[in-house]
Amino acid sequence: MSQMYNSTQVQQQFGRIMDQARADQVVVVERYGEPRAVIMDYGRYRQLLQMEQNLLRERLQAAAAAVAQRAGHLSEDEVDALIEQARSEVAQANEVR
């Protein structure tokens, strides 16, 4: 569950809002009516980073496996081109997020 606060409220009630974040509530900070930042428990943040890294690793492994599967009959130059294509696809997928 998340709570929404504007930036002025966060400044005025920072201690209480930090307590909420540490209690596993996500605090969304708005500025001019637009969500701008999130305050959350550091442990949860670390878990999200780890999950993101795992997902990126899985995507790269899948791309590498696809390249390896197609590379059985290809020349070295063709393999290098496919590897570069897979890297580009992974980079583009990361930019979309």
Image (spheres, grey):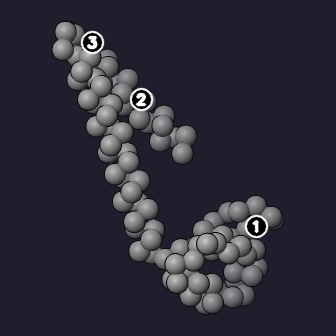
What residue would you read off at disc 2?
88
Of the numbered discs 1 and 3, the one sitting upstream in the chain is 1
Residue drawn at point x = 52 percent, y = 78 percent:
24
- Three-letter residue code for mark 3: Glu
Quarter location, residue 75: top left
What residue would you read off at disc 3?
78
Q: Residue furthest front?
A: 1
User: Is disc 2 placed on a helix, strand or loop?
Assistant: helix
* Side of 63 where 45 appears, left or right: right
* Side of 24 where 91 appears, left or right: left
Q: What distance separates the C-alpha of mark 1 from that of mark 3?
A: 50 Å
Q: Residues within 10 Å of mark 3 (few under 14, many from 20)?
A: few
Q: Residues within 10 Å of mark 2 (few under 14, many from 20)?
A: few
* Side of 80 where 93 appears, left or right: right
Of the numbered discs 3 and 2, the one sitting upstream in the chain is 3
x, y (%) of residue 77? 24, 12
Q: Is residue 13 above or below residue 24?
A: below
Can the viewer see residue 78?
yes
x, y (%) of residue 70? 26, 17
Q: What distance separates the C-alpha of mark 2 from that of mark 1?
A: 35 Å
Q: Is residue 26 above or below residue 89?
A: below
User: Is disc 1 placed on a helix, strand or loop?
Assistant: strand
Q: What distance separates the C-alpha of mark 3 from that of mark 2?
A: 15 Å
User: Is disc 3 placed on a helix, strand or loop?
Assistant: helix
- Number of marks in the image? 3
- Three-letter residue code for mark 1: Arg
Quadrant housing the C terminus: top right
* Side of 73 where 88 appears, left or right: right
Of the numbered discs 2 and 1, the one sitting upstream in the chain is 1
Marker disc for residue 31: 1
Q: Residues within 10 Å of mark 1 (few under 14, many from 20)?
A: few
- Three-letter residue code for mark 2: Ser
